[in-house]
Amino acid sequence: MNPKWEEDQPIYRQLRDRVVAMILEGVLGDGDALPSVRNVAAEYRLNPLTVLKGYQELVDEGLVEKKRGRGMFVNEGARTKLLKAERQRFLDKEWPKVRATIERLGLDEAELLRAKKPNKDAGEEND
C-alpha cells in the first residue's frame, strides 16, 4: 500500500479504496487475510480506529469478513462483485464523459481501434 494520503478524502476511505484496488488487481484473493489493523496502523502511523473504520466499510459492503480472534479475510467472490460494480460505475459515470470527448473530437471507431498503445518499457508515445 502507498503510504501517501490525499487531503481531499478521509484516510479511512482511502484505505478502503486501496484494499479494493488490491482485490481488483489480484494482490488479495478470495480467503486471503488483510494486513492486521495493528500492523497497518503502526506501518502508516495511523490511529487504529481509522484503520478499523476503513476495514469496517469493506465488511459492510460484503467484501471481507471479520473472524473473531483471527482477523479480516477477503470473501469468496469479492473480486467478481467489485468488477461488476466498477464496470457499472464506469458505464454510468465515466463513459458518458469519454463518449462526449470522442464525439467532440470527431474520432471514429476505426481511429480508436488503430490507436497505438504506449509502450512503457521502450518509452514510446502515441503518434
Image (cartoon, rainbow, N blue to C red):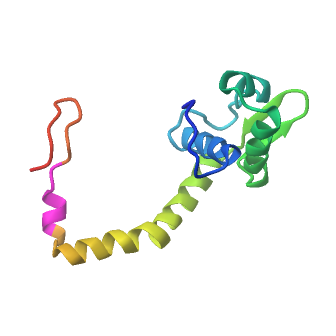
Count of number-bearing discs: 0
Question: Which residues make up the magenta segment?
Answer: 110-116
Q: Could you say where residue 74 lies in the image, as x and y percent from the top left?
A: 70, 39
In magenta segment, residue 20: no
Above or below residue 44? Residue 61 is below
Residue furthest to the left? 127
Q: Could you say where residue 88 lies in the image, as x and y percent from the top left?
A: 52, 66
Mainly helix, strand or loop, the magenta region? helix
Residue nearer the viewer, 46 or 71: 46
Q: Could you say where residue 38 lies in the image, as x and y percent from the top left?
A: 79, 25
Q: Could you say where residue 97 lies in the image, as x and y percent from the top left?
A: 37, 71
Residue under the point 58% across and 39% down: 5
Residue under the point 56% across and 44% down: 6
- Left or right? Give the position of 28 relative to 12: left
In magenta segment, residue 112: yes
Q: Quadrant of the N terminus?
A: top right
Residue furthest to the right? 68
Q: On the image, which quarter does residue 68 sit in? A: top right
Residue furthest to the front? 7
